[in-house]
Amino acid sequence: MKTSCLSIPGSICCHAVQKKCISELQLFCWLKLQCSGHFKINNQLLDKAYRELSITKPTFKKRINNLLKWRWIGLNSKSGSYHINSFKVLHNRLNDATIISVQWQGYNYNSFKGFVQAVALYVVARKKDYYEITQAKENGRRVVAVGMKKGRSSLNGYLPSFSLPIHYVAKKLNITPSYVSKMKDAAKCTKYIHIRKQKQEIKDSVMQSKKARKFHPDAHKFFYKNGKLYEQLPDKITFFFIAKRNRRLKHN
């Protein structure tokens, strides 16, 4: 094994989430860590893949075929040797302007799915934050909406936290809100994110009326606790990985 760390573009993680091909991305990254860009399928490689990725021979074959079909890898039919395309090549094909890369420490492949899903959430959060800051500057104001402003984590002052509505993520990634909830759970279980619930007390006399809340477009967000009315705000998420701008991913 040449290296134990990969710098994976956020655009590819978002693509894997959207197309539900995280398993293929896992194999792709595993192959990158096994060789210097070229490999042949032999018993030694297969045995290692079965053991480290916990997959079967049919699963390995199916994922390899998908990687070939999508041109993530290529095959020299004469020599039987495969070549692995670079992350930059894959990124350029996506025509995505995102130039964020996140470091993946290739030790525990059981947590890979949670890692990719956490990165996809992070990319959406960064884009949302950039848009809000740009809009605020254009309007000559600061972002002050309660529960939506980027802040610092209470766990670590150096880690930024983002308020990220589930339906916003679902729209941006073109997936269902229920899948976003599963993504958050997986990323939390693998310890790539920390989630903090947020709420805001509602003192508006109109909203105290049960009838008024019933016809509110976000009626499901209101709840009573200790005799006070609250609105459930988007969870605040803190991300635990190294993410950097990768200028090499810029399109020419």
Image: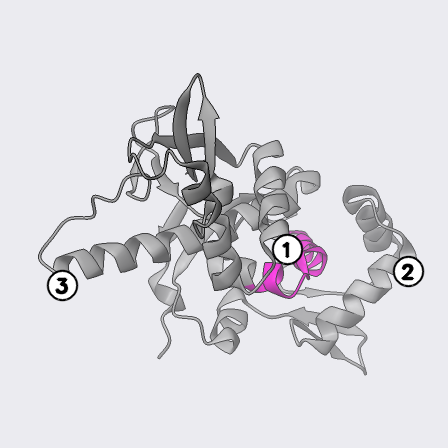
Q: Which residue is mark 3?
A: 138
Label 1 – label 2 distance at C-alpha = 19 Å
Q: Is residue 98 visible?
A: yes
Picture quadrant of residue 72? bottom right
Q: Earlier in the sequence, mark 1 or mark 3?
A: 1
In this view, the mark in front (1 or 2): 2
Q: Count neighbours of disc 3 (C-alpha within 10 A) and say few if under 14, some if 14 to 19, many if 20 or more.
A: few
Magenta residue span = 15-35
Question: What kind of element bears circle 1?
Answer: helix
Q: Is residue 146 left or right of residue 25?
A: left
Mark 1 residue type: Cys
Instruction: Answer whether residue 24 is magenta in the image.
Output: yes
Question: What kind of element bears circle 2?
Answer: helix
Q: Which residue is outermost to the top?
A: 226
- Residue 65's x, y, as percent? 79, 71
Q: Is residue 32 left or right of residue 195?
A: right
Q: Which residue is mark 2?
A: 58
Q: Which residue is mark 1?
A: 29
